[in-house]
Amino acid sequence: MSQSFATLVEVRNAIASKQISAVELTRQVLQRIESLDPVLHCYNEVWADRALQVAKEVDQGQRQGELAGVPIALKDNLCTRYGRTTCSSRMLANFKAPYDATVVRKLESAGAVIVGKTNLDEFAMGSSTENSAFGPTRNPWDTDRVPGGSSGGSAAALAASFCYGSIGSDTGGSIRQPASLCGLVGLKPTYGRISRYGLVAFASSLDQIGPFAWTVSDAALLLKVMSGHDPKDSTSAPMDVPDYVSSVDRPVEGLRIGIVKEYQSLPGLDPQVRSAIEQAIRTYEKLGARIVEVSLPNSAYGIAAYYVIAPCEASSNLARYDGVHYGHRTKEPVNDIVELFSKSRAEGFGDEVKRRIMIGTYALSSGYYDAYYVRAQKVRALIKRDFDHAFGFCDVILTPTSPMPAFRIGEKSSDPLSMYLCDIFTVTCNIAALPGISLPCGFTQDAKPLPIGMQLLAPAFGESTLLRVARMFEQATDFHTRRPVLG
Amino acid sequence: MAEQILNLEQVRHVAKLSRLAIPDDQLPRFTQQLESILEYVEQIKQADVQGVEPMAHAVRLTNVFRDDTPQPALSTQEVLSNAPETDGPFFKVPKVIGEDDSAG
């Protein structure tokens, strides 16, 4: 019996009750990848031998846990001792991390079978996975379209049933937006909820790891496994982890949902997305929720502040790639070490990474620092203040995740700014360090229907509420049961 | 048309500060792209930030201390395993100091 497109909890239970062996399930997944991934290009590297070995250990009872035998995919910016960690960059094409990221250790301790490393926009910079040095990933719902990004490989791998849960990172929407474009649940936890140790740094004040799943319960389980304080990440929160799984089915009594006044008349919002969101609001009303209008006046500056803060942090974080300690080194003759740095970096980085390093370097340079960096940090304070005020009137805020469904490959790649505007609803969540979730709330009328996602935002460390509110919608609708038709 | 924020010479300078060897024929394209991004980013100048303190992070973070006790660390071999060029226990780089600078 094929388990394709089953949920994580379904396959986990099927293994636990010996309906299927972990080895058989892993074999099915590997066969699917072998036949379909040459078109989709979700994976940078597939760990076939190792996955089968781990699955065998599960079947023999040597590995146990809440994810025992479940095939999981990792975004290729999470360090793993096994295989390579490339960040989809020529710079790290042959990089082998000397240690495992904390989340990798936690997933494996829970019995997960890691299937491989997935494609991303180089160093997680992008919203389409077209910025990968190894070629774009295609959307399983329509292979002419992008899966979103930057965690597009992890999203597409799950949507194609090349795994039963996958892990991404979200700096400005890089989990939620691809989840939306691929018809999945995608969760960006509160900053500090999950250890970032072993996540290759892009923008350290914004980066956070999180899961992709078919259902809210699957996402709750992955969150539970990955969360918790880690002495190796001093920004991880020294707080207990609630049992997200056992609470998820409990509806929120007297739920108040905030809708954002400033988003009501936003130009550039696809009409089909708008109508799916309106329908979702009506669904919540029928469930007894009260809809409250809230104001986030400074969210208008969200993208602008983000595209100062993130590049500034990136220009500093990516200074470590010098062609000396690890990573690409130029083969050209050089006269001195500065030339070695400059040529190695120019050859190793793609154009989007270069643009962001230069924007960040410019914004941090003498004479411009106050006008850009300091001012963006003040806007951050204003955005945070707006959210604090709004959450006085509601439990969660509901918005679209992406202003448009999946766009065509190549459609936005020549205009960096138009790509940045994809993040309009997602960046403020990272700026204010809040948790956010995207879940399917509709499909377009296209010949190949494309998923539409909605985003829910909650106050810091409000993941339990967020998951419960998302689950209420899921129980009342069937969008999460649709699956793409593939070759 | 808005005033130009960035000219080609500035981009050349920023590329140098960024340690990116951008060839001359790519400078016009990068200048135009960076200009359009900065033009958009200029919007933050319209935000009313009167009396607002800059916020480096939305989560209240404080210094985290631990006891200064030795922990297991990576071996020299592991640390060097990804280096493009090594010499014994060292990372190897081209000459850093010019002939004239050598101590005499």
Image: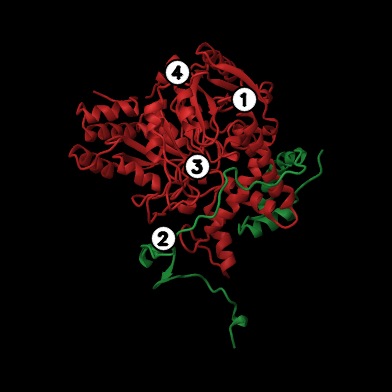
Chain colours: A red, B green
Circles 2 and 3, Cβ within 8 Å, touching? The answer is no
Element carrying mark 3: strand
Circles 3 and 1, Cβ within 8 Å, touching? The answer is no
Chain letter for the residue marked with disc 1 in the picture: A
Circles 2 and 1, Cβ within 8 Å, touching? The answer is no
Q: Looking at the picture, which amino acid does disc 1 mark?
A: Phe
State how far apart marks 2 and 1 are (Cα).
Answer: 53 Å
Rendering quarter of residue B2: top right
From the viewer's side, name the closer residue of A395 and B76. A395
Chain letter for the residue marked with disc 3 in the picture: A
The numbered disc on residue A479 is 4
Element carrying mark 2: loop
Q: Check if mark 3 and mark 1 are on a common chain.
A: yes
Q: Is residue A71 above or below residue B93?
A: above
Give neighbour class at mark 1: few <14, some 14-19, many 20+ (Cα, 10 Å): some
State how far apart marks 2 and 3 are (Cα).
Answer: 26 Å
Pointer 2 residue: B82
Residue A155 at least partly seen: yes
Give neighbour class at mark 4: few <14, some 14-19, many 20+ (Cα, 10 Å): many
- Of labels 3 and 1, earlier in sequence is 3
Element carrying mark 4: helix
Rendering quarter of residue A73: top left
Q: Looking at the picture, which amino acid does disc 2 mark?
A: Asn
The numbered disc on residue A208 is 3
User: Which quarter shows the C terminus of chain A?
Assistant: top left
Q: Is residue A363 above or below residue A441?
A: below
- Of labels 3 and 4, earlier in sequence is 3
Locate residue A222, reporting x and y percent: 38, 35
The numbered disc on residue A393 is 1
Q: How many marks?
A: 4
